[in-house]
Amino acid sequence: MLGEVFALVAALSFSGAAIFYRAGVRGSQVNPIVLSGLRGMFALALLLVVGFFYRVDFSKPPVFYLAVFLSMLGSFILGDSSFLYGLQRAPLGVVYPVAYTFSVFTALFSHFILGEELTLRDAVSSLLIVLGVALVYSENFSLGKQALVGALAGLSASVSWGAGATLMGLALRWGNAVEVNISRLSMLVIATLPLILKNSSEVFRQVRVHLLALGGILGIGVGPLLFMNSISFIGASRSSIFISSTPVLTVLLSRIFLGEKTGGKLLLGTLAVSAGLALQSL
C-alpha cells in the first residue's frame, strides 16, 4: 500500500510541477536555459539535504561523470529548456502530452546504446502514444502557429529526455539515483550560473520565480525521490503504471488551475498517451 501511495504522490508532484512551470513562465521571453538552471538550484538544495540521509559516494570513475554530463545536457539543457520554451508560448495541454512520449525514444536509444531488447509491446505502446499525440494536436490545431510551436517544443523535449534518460541509465551502473541526480543538478547549476546572473533583472521582471522554484522542487526534487521509494516497495513496473497517469492528471489540473481548454479529442489523446505509457511499463 505504501508503495502505491508514494507512486501516486510522485505522479501528482510531476503534474503539479508542470502547472507551476506554466504559471511561472507563461508569456515571458527569458532564455529557457536560464529558467532550467534557476529552478535546478532549488531542486539541488533539496537533494543535498536528502543526501545526508542516503549513502552517497562521489569517488567514481571518469566514465560515470561523462555519462552524467551527457545526461545533464540531454535532460536539462536540451530537454527541459525545450519544454519550458513551449510552456512560454503554448498551452500546457499541447506541450505536455507530446513531451511525455519520451519513453518511446528512451526505448529506442536504450536498444542501440545499452543493448536493451525492443518488443512487440513497445511497438503497440508506441502506436498508442503516436495516436494520442495526433489527437492532442488536432484538438489544438485551431491555435495555428501557437499549437505548432508547442507541439514541436514538446517533441524536442521528448527526444532529448529520451537520450538523457538512457544516459542516466548508463551512469546508474556506477552510482545510485541520488548520486546521479546530485551530480547532474550540480553540473546544470555550474553551467548556467553565469547566464542566470547576467539575466537576473530580466528574470525577476518577467518570471514568477516562486512558482518556477516550486515546480523545480516538485518536478526534479520531490517527484523522483518519491518514485525511487515507490520502486523499492512495489518495483519499477507497478510504480511506472502510476506515473503513466501524469499526462491525464496534468491536463485535468491545467483546466482547474490555469483555465485551459480540455476538449474531447484532447482528453482522448491524453488517455491514449497514458495507456501507451502504462502498456510499456507492464
Image: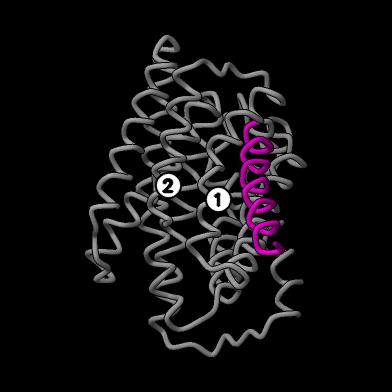
Give the residue drawn at x 40%, y 29%.
151
| Quarter location, residue 44 | bottom right
In the rendered image, which quarter contains the C terminus?
bottom left
| Proximity of marks 2 and 1: CB atoms separated by less than 8 Å | yes
Find residue 185 and name its label.
none
Q: Position of residue 194 (x, y in %)?
A: 59, 55
Give the residue drawn at x 55%, y 34%.
248
Can residue 186 be seen in this snapshot?
no
Q: Badge 2 local density, few (<14 within 10 Å), some, or many (20+)?
A: many
Can residue 209 be seen in this snapshot?
yes
130 vs 1, left or right, is: left
* Span highlighted in magenta in the image: 1-22
In the rendered image, which quarter contains the N terminus?
bottom right
The image shows residue 249, relative to residue 123, as above or below, that is above
Find residue 243 and name its label.
1
Q: Position of residue 37 (x, y in %)?
A: 59, 53
